[in-house]
Amino acid sequence: MNQARDEYDVIVLGAGPVGENVADRTRAAGLSTAIVERELVGGECSYWACVPSKALLRPVLARAEARQVPGLRQSVGGALSATDVFAHRDKQVGDWKDDGALPWLESAGIDLVRGHGRLVGPQRVAVTSPDGSGGDERILTARHAVAVCTGTRASLPDLPGIADVHPWTSREATSSSSVPERLIIVGGGVVACEMATAWNGLGSRVTMLVRGSGLLERIEPFAGELVTETLREAGAEVRTGTSVKSLARPGGADGPVTVTLESGERLEADEVLFATGRTPHTDDLGLETVGLESGGWLTVDETCRVRDVPGGWLYGVGDVNHRALLTHQGKYQARIAGAAIGARARGVARLDTDRWGAYATTADEAAVPQVVFTDPEVAAVGLTAEQAEAEGRSIRVVDIDMGQVEGAVLYADGYRGQARMVVDLDRGHPIGVTFVGPGVSELLHSATIAVAGEVPIERLWHAVPSFPTISEVWLRLLEAYRG
Amino acid sequence: MNQARDEYDVIVLGAGPVGENVADRTRAAGLSTAIVERELVGGECSYWACVPSKALLRPVLARAEARQVPGLRQSVGGALSATDVFAHRDKQVGDWKDDGALPWLESAGIDLVRGHGRLVGPQRVAVTSPDGSGGDERILTARHAVAVCTGTRASLPDLPGIADVHPWTSREATSSSSVPERLIIVGGGVVACEMATAWNGLGSRVTMLVRGSGLLERIEPFAGELVTETLREAGAEVRTGTSVKSLARPGGADGPVTVTLESGERLEADEVLFATGRTPHTDDLGLETVGLESGGWLTVDETCRVRDVPGGWLYGVGDVNHRALLTHQGKYQARIAGAAIGARARGVARLDTDRWGAYATTADEAAVPQVVFTDPEVAAVGLTAEQAEAEGRSIRVVDIDMGQVEGAVLYADGYRGQARMVVDLDRGHPIGVTFVGPGVSELLHSATIAVAGEVPIERLWHAVPSFPTISEVWLRLLEAYRG
């Protein structure tokens, strides 16, 4: 074993998009960097989340849109070829092999250490072989920083029988290559809604069991309402105010699953998916050896440095810090944290951590964008009206029926959609924008730039949307605001 | 005749989108307003341009996109139902009747005067009946302003035989309800490219005859190149460096048209479309009665007031002023000109006509957006690299292959596209952005806000694009800029 190579400037735990971006930035800053991964380089997002889910969803959404296009709709009435969709998905995830991700690591000069990494005291990481044998332990030391980028995993509720039925989580829901005839989905958030859309589109009879009063409760209310409406029209059942009491597979692994509700009612399906939240991957990282609690979210400052760790060498980047559980937001944090590690290693005395400074993850609080690939698409950035009010801001809210926008009608015959802009009256710029409707996913970035750029309403009047695009909803929003 | 009603605060000539918006703003300012229209309320855009062309194009583009979606592509291999496409187009243009546009005029309190309006001296407009009999002339006087919003019409080159062959212009190309078996298109600009895309998609064998060296020459070069490539793959012929010498229909109106090229070569087709530029609709407006030249473009200031007319009562808004020949840009001018007319009528001493001021059409020079609905879509705002260099600006240009953006690949298998950002190094913000690729039309407004909002590069880093959308091209552009 080459002892010299076991000392690095930076050690990154987890080679998902977040870890990769931290390493990319620390290498760009001239720091030697090792990245420790016990599964696949590329992480959850590339193999069991965003990428495969979008690969499953795009055909469903493209078909839904084509059905709203005169002259084309007749040809797309039938079923999708699930075989082709799965084959495409498999290609997009590299058949769950990470060979394709390795050349980039090498070209960036990042050392990949395969295995399970855990802290064994300050600035020290022990890596054990991925086979779990515990043998072949290697100790790495970090001169400047350790960045924890291990993300989250699906959390399952503690229900009688849940282990026996082998429920789907987001992993199985994005990687399955067979279409269950009947699929029960527990949950009403983004994963639940996207997977309901995908599997319903691929031919499953979907039943959603939602504890709350509607879908997508963290987004403006009309988003969940429109998605519910379309899911129901597409044949899915959406049951709100419903809790699961227990589960069983009375016929064994090959038989159907029985879901018993709190009401006593029993439902039967072929598979059941739990999309009921995420747990941080921090329970087996040795956090207790540096004075932190194991299994919790990491509390970080605006540079993603973990608070309350003497010496300031520990960073928590991406989902583990619970600031914004989204791949793109984790990558954003990674760019900033990686740059901060680099600057501090160079001895830069004071980093610009002011609001919107180069070393402040300001967007995590002010401008988190999210696209939900449902039918219709949901795209939102910044604060909802409710959130802004809860913060005590003085706001004005304007709503527009997107079905009145000519570019939308020309995009999809019978277009249904809704837009909302929340303007901070003291600041004079939008602080939250939500679009719901076909084809809005690429429209969102206009709102993200307006919110993060704090572009005043007066200036937005000069940003002319092209006719006839859906983007003309901006003009309607501004007119309604003026009106 | 009620003489009192013939005096208005404002008279608008032309009831297209531009005239309608001027009138809307002057009415909102409390000014009595008449709008004079000799054809249809709604104008060229609603009946013979943007609206019908988009109605014809959307099915073609939606099919092209669906063909790039695994699981769906098999079902969309066949022909579009042209009958359905035409029926939809006819519905979108209200069957070329303007009944649908009248209630809005009435509710806004705008008086519609049908007929041909022309100036007969300062602040006086004579309106003759639309039948052209010349009888029943009515004289209107404008206390404050006359706004000329008469737009443009297709200009035909003076070629032997051109009148005899009854060539298509943009009007026939957007309103035809039969698919010519062979269609020759003369021109290589936006109308030519869009109509080539539409009619090729609807089944015509299209030949484009382009005088210049490529298509879409006012946009970044890669736009025309990618559109040419796709048109050729779709079976169209694109011939550059080619000029037409003469035309004939030897077999009469029902026979084919023969196009003779400068080279002597003869081509035969069923219809020939000339998309060779626009002429201002100013030749029959009585401009000579107020000291202006008839038939020319109107030279206006930043509020769209015509220069060199004593008293400052004459405005030229939209295409007629030649600032930016696009519906949305004309509507933008209309909002500003209408507000300026209102403010001046109220006696406001000094209007804010500074750069980006409320009464300055600054975007006309700095941030004109345009979407070309071809396959692939072309979307551009602001200056091209060549234009910026010609202005002597210090710039940095970054290019990105959009086929490397994960969100693009997940949108369309085998995605082909290109993006360019032009940054003004002295100002520190983008001054031009061009996207070419499937699904970029709604992405453009992000660039329009960045350019018009003059959002600094440092702040754009905080505008996080959602993963996995095509919008992540922004991240690649910023990375390339930093690199």
Image (spheres, coloured by chain):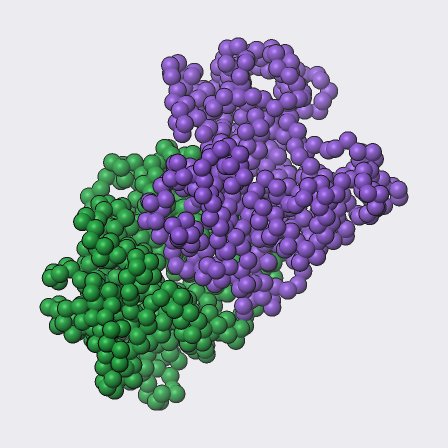
Chain colours: A purple, B green
Q: Where does residue A122 sit, x and y in percent of width and height? A: 57, 11
Name the foreground residue: A58 vs B330.
Answer: B330
Q: Where does residue B84 sit, x and y in percent of width and height? A: 53, 73
* Residue closest to the far right: A251
Name the foreground residue: B375 vs A421.
Answer: A421
Q: Is residue A101 left or right of residue B100?
A: right
Q: Where does residue B289 sit, x and y in percent of width and height? A: 12, 72
Which residue shows up at 55% across the image and 63% down it?
Answer: A414
Q: Is residue A403 left or right of residue A136?
A: left
Query: Which quadrant of the view contains residue A187?
Result: top right
Which residue shows up at 30% across the image and 59% down it?
Answer: B30
Residue B431 lies, with reference to residue B368, above or below; the image says above
Residue A132 visible within the image: yes
Q: Where does residue A411 sit, x and y in percent of width and height? A: 49, 60
Which residue shows up at 67% across the image and 44% down it?
Answer: A213
Q: Quadrant of the C terminus of chain B?
A: top left
Residue A328 visible within the image: no
Residue B119 lies, with reference to residue A323, above or below; the image says below
